[in-house]
Amino acid sequence: MGEHRNSSGFLVKQRAFLKLYLITLIENKHLYGLKLRDLLKQEFSDLGYQPHHPEIYKSLHELIEQGIIYQIKEKREGNKYQEVVYYNFTEDGKEKANAYKKLMKVELDRCKALLDKAIRDNY
C-alpha cells in the first residue's frame, strides 16, 4: 500500500489508481479478470485512458499480496478444461480495502488540488 503515501510525487501512480478501482469493482460484483479489464476500459474510454492488461493483473496480484483479495478458480460452464479466476475479499480484506481507499482519497485530493492550481494559474 506504500506507493501512494509518497506525496512528493506529482500525481498518483497508475497501479495505485487501478487498485482503487479494482477494489470498488470487486465490492460491487464477484468478477473475473477480463471482466474487470473490460469495465475499466469502458469506464475511462471517454477520457482517453485504457489501462493495459498487464497493469491490471499486476494490480490484482498486489492486492492479493497485501491480503485484501484472493482468487477463486472455477471451471467454466460447458468447458471442462477452462478455468475462470474470480476475485473476492479475504476475511479482513474489506477492512484493509477501506483503509487503502481512505489513504487514496487523501492522495487524490492532493493531486486534484495540484491540477486545479495548474489550470487556474495557467489558463
Image: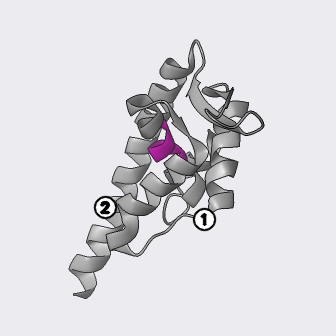
Coloration of the structure image: one colour
Compared with 15, 88 (above or below) is above
Q: Position of residue 108 (x, y in %)?
A: 39, 52
Q: What's under tag 1, amino acid-wise? A: His
The residue drawn where x is 60% and y is 18% is 90
The residue drawn where x is 45% and y is 62% is 41
The residue drawn where x is 74% and y is 33% is 80
Name the foreground residue: 3 vs 89.
89
On screen, residue 63 versus residue 16, left or right, reads: right
* Magenta stretch, residue numbers: 19-23
Q: Is residue 20 magenta?
A: yes
Q: Position of residue 106 (x, y in %)?
A: 39, 44
Q: What's under tag 2, amino acid-wise? A: Ala
Residue furthest out toward the right: 81
Residue at the spot of label 2? 113
Q: Is residue 76 magenta?
A: no
**Cα gap from disc 1 to disc 2, whole angstroms:** 27 Å
Query: Visible in this render: residue 66?
Result: no
Residue at the spot of label 1? 52
On screen, residue 9 versus residue 123, left or right, reads: right
Residue furthest out toward the front: 78
Q: Which mark is residue 41?
A: none
Give the dominant element type of the magenta stretch: helix, strand or loop.
helix
The residue drawn where x is 66% and y is 35% is 85
Q: Position of residue 73 (x, y in %)?
A: 70, 28
Secondary structure category for the residue under label 1: loop
Crowd class of label 1 (few under 14; some 14 to 19; many from 20; radius 10 Å): few
